[in-house]
Image (tube, rainbow, N blue to C red):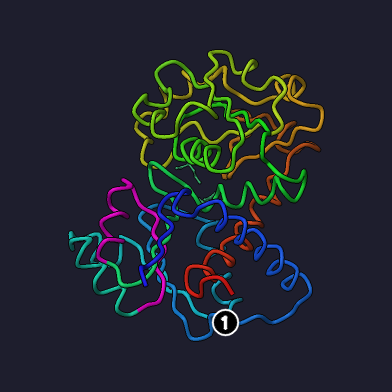
Amino acid sequence: MAIKHFLQFNDLNRDELEYVFERTRWIKSQFKDYQQYWPLQDRTLVMIFEKASTRTRLSFEAGMQQLGGSAIYLNTRDSQLGRGEPVEDAAQVISRMSDLVMIRTFEQEIIERFAANSRVPVINGLTNEYHPCQILADIFTYIEHRGSIKGKTVAWIGDSNNMCHTWLQAAELLDFNVHVSTPPGYEVEPERANLYGTDHFEVFADPMDAARGADLVTTDVWTSMGFEAENEERMRDFADWQVDSDMMRVAAKDALFMHCLPAHRGEEVSAEVIDGVQSVVWDEAENRLHTQKALMEYLLLGKL
Ligand code: CP
Ligand code: NVA
């Protein structure tokens, strides 16, 4: 049987996503009820981090343990990965000693090369291009609060980064719309925009226009990991792209606010919004745990 990876959001089709969401609901309810559920007993997850993390590491490590398995953390600093061992060789070795691998790295190409040489499923824990596990949690969170996301409008305000790209992929797959507003010079690249089709994706020069009537307003840091050298310039360029109360006021009355975290109050979002009643950022963070448990269960055991 072909190995199933989760390198991009659309590595799962609509049916598979619906299945993962259904399993998430069940796994979450068992967890809340303190019920032991160990379908991955004796399975080992290896987590490779080439960038910092709080949520991703914690949710995968805790999630694997809660499913009865174990998780091993590797980073670039104290493994041979940081000393130039080819990613193909690392994939051969790591995948012979584990059942599942999660990687957080730089270019998407690195994770694709790893997966091509892996004997076990590989999960994208964030690359420069995509953050599919986060969008899985975000959409699950939307569904929990408001029901189906089909036909709804998500306003993406800020950088056209890994989160933005993944929202665009998800919109195509799950049939909702994304309004994108970025500062000039930070637009979604035309080649990438074409990848997702234009049916579910509209660009706005003014962030207020992007947010107008939206069902969900979301943003992310102005400087993603790996782009720190551009920080000063970005602070200037993004100054008018803060999600604040005025922006939330033009969105739909029952609009939600999301942010994958970590957040910078006073930069991409005002404190009033992220700490306000429309914000569901803590549910979003918690749902990383539940959605990824369902994802790991699916990649290892298939449909039950
Ligand atoms: N949202 C997210 O991926 O957080 P971490 O960088 O803390 O893992
Ligand atoms: N876009 C951010 C997300 C962090 C979770 C980054 O890549 O740093």
Most extreme residue toward the bottom, as rendered?
Answer: 42
Q: Position of residue 292 (x, y in %)?
A: 56, 62
Q: Start and end of the magenta stretch?
A: 98-117
**Magenta region includes residue 108:** yes
Q: Secondary structure at mark 1?
A: loop
Q: Position of residue 5 (x, y in %)?
A: 40, 61
Please give the name of the residue rendered at 61% of the width and 76% of the height, measured from the top-left corner.
Answer: 66
Please give the name of the residue rendered at 77% of the width and 43% of the height, measured from the top-left corner.
Answer: 146
Q: Position of residue 102 (x, y in %)?
A: 42, 63
Pointer 1 local density, CA inside 10 Å: few below 14, some 14–19, many at least 20? some
**Magenta region includes residue 231:** no
| Rendered-image quadrant of the C terminus | bottom right
Q: Position of residue 115 (x, y in %)?
A: 31, 61
Q: Which residue is mark 1?
A: 68
- Describe residue 89's horizontal placement relative to residue 263 as left or right: left
Kindly identify the amino acid type of the residue bearing the numbered disc 1.
Gly
